[in-house]
Amino acid sequence: MKSLASRFSKNFSSPKSKLNLFYFLAFAPLLLIAYYDIWILIVSFYGFVLFLLKSEKLQPAKEARTPQKIIGLAFIIGSFFLYYVLVLAFPKAAYYGGANYIAFLLGLFLTFFDLSGLKEAFSPIFFVAAATSSSLIAEQLEPYFSPYIDEMAYLIVNILRTLGINAYIYNSSNAPIISFTSLSGNLVLASFVYECIGVFSVIVFSILLATVLFEDPSSWTTRSLAVAMGILGTFAMNIIRVTIIFLTDYFYGAEAGATVHYIIGYALFSTWLVFFLYVYSKRDTVQTNIKSFLNRQNYQEA
């Protein structure tokens, strides 16, 4: 029995075991966030992924001292009661959201690692903090992007017409209204508002990209190209999102369109992020394959 307890204690005290416990505890609150807000869950999950990418740097980090552990535990416990402070300033705040998760993660770092390891917490915590505040940033940018609402609405209408849907735009005092008759013969009317442009998604994507590229050793040219392609791809993803919503309205009715409207943004945004980050991580291989393909083409033409 003593041998078993000794072996368990030894395994638990190993750096790898402590890191696994850290990641398990860092993941657990995501289940609570999922109950309150899917969007905050997506943001927080990518913050957690950024932590996972730091496993090699965190494993050799020294253990925190007792006073620091006490402070860390206070942050962890306090994160579950932060709602009662936030609700005073933000009445619509959920019981457990991005701010709670930030406090929880900071507490975990203070509990598990010394201050030298704490620097690795900056980029993930910065991302969660900035991305969960992106709606406020989007509101501030509304005067600058609102003039493009009409252009974007006409683009969507032209896409629908290309796909065979006889869509029209009616200009109103508030926002352009896209109109068409569904396959079942019902009239569909939808206001094309500021949120339809996709500024919110671009802000979140840009924050994640800035966080990732901040620690990336690639050249400024490579990183600038990645930013440009990423932002353009995010706008294109939003156009696809809006088009899919209208296509659902046309083929399956407004009720089905409302359901798709709720989930399609999360699904497309998550898929695009995973795809982009994967391609970026494999950029050297992709560049090599492209050069090899072009060389073969030039050789054949010669």
Image: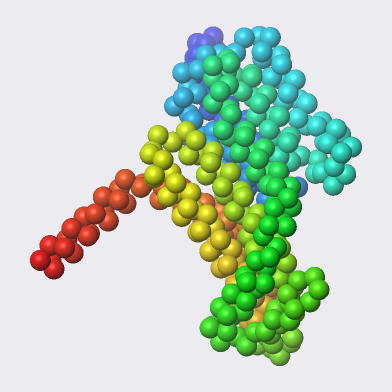
- The correct choice, above or below, for 265 with respect to 176 in the image is above
Q: Which residue is drawn at 74% across and 41% down?
A: 97
Compared across the picture, whether 294 is left or right of 181 comes to: left
Q: Which residue lies furthest to the left in this view?
A: 302
Nearer to us in this view, 95 or 91: 91
Q: For residue 47, which quarter of the picture?
A: top right
Q: Residue furthest bottom?
A: 185
- The correct choice, above or below, for 12 with respect to 220 in the image is above
Identify the image quadrant of the N terminus.
top right
Compared across the picture, whether 221 is left or right of 43 comes to: left
Q: For residue 43, which quarter of the picture?
A: top right
Compared across the picture, whether 103 is left or right of 282 comes to: right
- The correct choice, above or below, for 187 with respect to 64 in the image is below
For the question of whether residue 85 can be seen, the reply is yes
Q: How many numbered discs sit on the rendered protein?
A: 0
Compared across the picture, whether 32 is left or right of 242 comes to: right
Q: Residue at x 46, y 24 (%)?
A: 57
On the image, the x and y values in percent for residue 189 come to 75, 79
On the image, the x and y values in percent for residue 180 come to 69, 85
For the question of whether residue 8 can be seen, the reply is no
- The correct choice, above or below, for 204 with respect to 235 in the image is above
On the image, the x and y values in percent for residue 63 come to 56, 13
Q: Residue at x 44, y 46 (%)?
A: 224
Asked which colour scheme the image uses, the reply is rainbow
Identify the image quadrant of the C terminus.
bottom left
On the image, the x and y values in percent for residue 110 come to 64, 19
Q: Which residue is drawn at 74% across and 87% down?
A: 186
